[in-house]
Image (cartoon, rainbow, N blue to C red):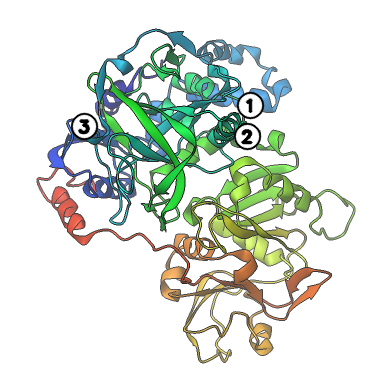
Amino acid sequence: MGYRNLAACVADLEKHGELVRIEAEIDPHLEAAEVQRRVYQANGPAVYFAKVKGSRFPMVSNLFGTPDRTRLMFRDTLESVKALVRLKTDPAAAMKHPLRNLKFVRTLSHMLPRKSRRGPAIRHQTTLDQLPQLVSWPNDGGPFITLPAVYTEHPAKRSLMQSNLGMYRVQIAGNEYEPNKQIGLHYQIHRSIGVHHAAAIERGERLPVNIFIGGPPALPLSAVMPLPEGLSELTFAGAIGGRAMRMIVGHSPLPIYSEADFTIVGSIDPHATLPEGPFGDHLGYYSNRHEFPVMEVDAVYHREGAIWPFTTVGRPPQEDTSFGEIIHEITGPAIPSVIPGVHAVHAVDAAGVHPLLLAIGSERYVPYAQDRTPQELLTNANAILGQGQLSLAKFLLIAAKEDNPELDIHDIAAYFHHVLERVDWSRDLHFQTKTTIDTLDYSGQGFNQGSKVVIAAAGKPRRELGTEVPSEINWPSGVRNVRVCLPGVLAVETVDDCLCPPTDSTIGEKLQTFPLIVVVDDADFTARTLNNFLWVTFTRANPATDISGFDQFIEHKHWGCRGPLVIDARIKPHHAAPLIEDPEVTKRVDQLAAPGGPLHGII
């Protein structure tokens, strides 16, 4: 059976050597977050902060810090949930071995949430200013809840089974929020809470909201699980947690999860907004202040012995990478049934998740053709960009499975090699301009505004890829450094716009083995690691404005180029600032890692 509450999870992880306790007082302003980031980067244990400056509540972080620890926490239920996904994907194959599926019965029994009149979650009350005031980055606008489970119900269909449990950014102080009475909710319009909010606006009603913090690890995992709209995350939480979700009714306008460590109860005025942010976000930059809904707080509850769980986000990989891995492990097999013709999709974490998708699709429209060209792949691509959070992608690369049935969507270097060998820039680029992108992405023309490009590659290889910088090229005077990032990919450091767009066709002719040129501020940094290349290229470029190419043309409103493609991935004036740690805080964390310190040998 799964954990009943967060305290049980902490005790179990400590028993298995997967948790370290810090008894020294830790400041939730920057220090705790830097500890978390550094322990995560070291593949370290979960961290329990026994003494938190300014708060009587302990904190815990890095619960999901490694895939093995995540599997340990869900060791009693993970295989059953994966089997349920397989059953949905291929019922006939799953039912060939019915005895193996008997465990479904218990799992299914946990999926129906139960109602209760009492529970530990409502035993005590406190105020917002008594909670750990977690600030992760120096320029953050205030303290944030980073592992919330935000619960809402559709105003016209109030029920547990018509609810939404989502993980949205929650600012609990700072800016113009009235202390202890107002908090900010940052969520994107396509999320289910946005559907509920829109319905409340249409009805002229306030939208009740309950925010749960803590509880067993099934709660935050369920809040980030990409379930179809209308399917309650409470059902998944019961399945993966090994226990039906018990919800206290009659105590507030919405049910309260009985095992939550903290619950903030309130409502959103249908028309009220206040500035939220800045906040150091998962792209590796600050998201700036913007107007977002404001929640009026009616009460803050906590259980006896409550623990405040948190994570911190920033340039990936971070702990949310592990969320992505377990989500893919569970839901990956269902992709072909959700998007017919698509075999796999990978939202690349190192590129900030949403900016870059890699996909493998079918190309069967003309099976007798001697050389495939992208046709069905374009249908696949449109379907992918119509799916929930996948619609936020800026760059979608899709390759034909028929060209290499063994192509691994997670071997990123090999995937790029496969695509760059085959891509035809005169044919295989397909843009969407003046459309929506991720709210947190500032590479576009404005807030929520940007473009997308699909790069579809099919057929036989058309080129060999270079691995050394060509020595015979006479680069323009503005070029000061050139490095190879991957076979066929050059990072070119410039001090002006000499390659954006390129005009010297003789250079393009000598770069035929390098079909992709990335113009950057620092070529050495970009080429140093695969992750650096992915982060720089795809977080700093807006396809419609930052893609150009050698010998470019427009034909019947189709843009293409006959020479290498050029992506301008330099930092522009309108981009958000990158995240940088406070050096004084870094020194304090270094002391925790010194001999005799609680993190010695861990970071």
Q: Element at badge 1? A: helix
Q: Height in image: 138 above or below 160? A: below
**What is the distance, in whole Å, between disc 3 and disc 1 at their CAs?**
40 Å
Label 2 secondary element:
helix
User: Residue 309, percent across and down?
Assistant: 31, 33
Q: Which part of the image, by quadrant, shows the N terminus?
A: top left
Q: Which mark is residue 333?
A: 2
Q: Which badge, 3 or 1, comes first in the chain's sequence?
A: 3
Residue at horizontal 57 percent and vertical 69 percent from the top = 487
| 281 or 126, nearer to the observer | 126
User: Mark 2 near mark 3, Cβ–Cβ under 8 Å?
Assistant: no
Find out whether the residues at labels 1 and 2 contact each other: C-beta distance under 8 Å.
yes
x, y percent for residue 316: 42, 53
Compared to 521, does 220 lie above or below?
Answer: above
Please give the residue where the numbered disc 3 appears in the rendered image. 58
| Picture residue at 26% right of the left edge, 28% below the top | 307
Say which of 102 and 322 sits in front: 322
Res 44 visible:
yes
Q: Is residue 425 left or right of residue 34?
A: right
Q: Earlier in the sequence, mark 2 or mark 3?
A: 3
Can residue 213 be seen from the camera position used here?
no
Residue where numbered disc 1 is placed: 86
Secondary structure of the residue carrying numbered label 3: loop
Q: Is residue 283 above or below residue 43?
A: below
Compare residues 128 and 355 and report the one nearer the observer.
Answer: 128
Q: Residue furthest top?
A: 117
Estimate the x, y position of residue 226 in percent, counting from the top left.
Answer: 56, 35
Residue 28 % position (x, y): 22, 43
